[in-house]
Image (tube, rainbow, N blue to C red):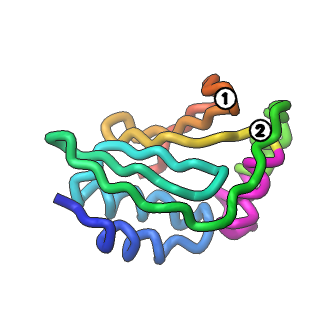
Amino acid sequence: MFTAEQIKKAHSKVKSGADFPAYIREIRSMGVTHYEAYVSDGHIDYHGDNDHTVLLPAKYQPIPIALSLQTDTFKASLLAHQKGETDYLTFIRMCAETGIKKWEISMDKMTCTYYDHADNEVLTEQIPQ
């Protein structure tokens, strides 16, 4: 079973979106099956087999999530982040400003799905392997 300390150590290696696929591979090898990351305060809920769950607390003061979704702006900013052009907190601010509430990672499907404030699916992407 994975621990909060193991997750934090793996996440500490992520400096930009370009580092994300390696992070996913690492936590998948620990037994993480899926997780939800919340933009508003940075808390993340990690899940594994047999209902094993590790909850990481908020990382920063709450920020408001825009109620109006700006899909094209979000997609352009996401692409820049994936290329390593922005850091994590810049990505978080961009998500909030464009109406993204959270994202969910599925290790089985190797997908990342983004949701708006009303939990509507905005975008699902394959995670590079």
Q: Main secondary structure of the magenta part?
A: helix
Mark 2: secondary structure: loop
Task: Look at discs 2 and 1 and give the one toward the viewer.
Answer: 2
112 above or below 6? Answer: above
Nearer the observer, 23 or 91: 91
Q: Are marks 2 and 1 in contact (CB under 8 Å)?
A: yes
Mark 2 highlights which residue? 99
Residue 51, percent across and down?
A: 20, 40
Nearer the observer, 78 or 61: 61
Please say whether residue 18 is one of the residues in the magenta stretch.
Answer: no
Mark 1: secondary structure: strand
Please say whether residue 91 is one of the residues in the magenta stretch.
Answer: yes
Residue 125, percent across and down?
A: 56, 37
107 above or below 124? Answer: below
User: Relative to residue 39, is residue 34 drawn left or right?
Assistant: left
Magenta segment range? 79-97
Nearer the observer, 77 or 50: 50
Residue 87, percent across and down?
A: 69, 69
Residue type at numbered disc 2? Gly
Q: Residues within 10 Å of mark 1 (few under 14, many from 20)?
A: some
Mark 1 highlights which residue? 122
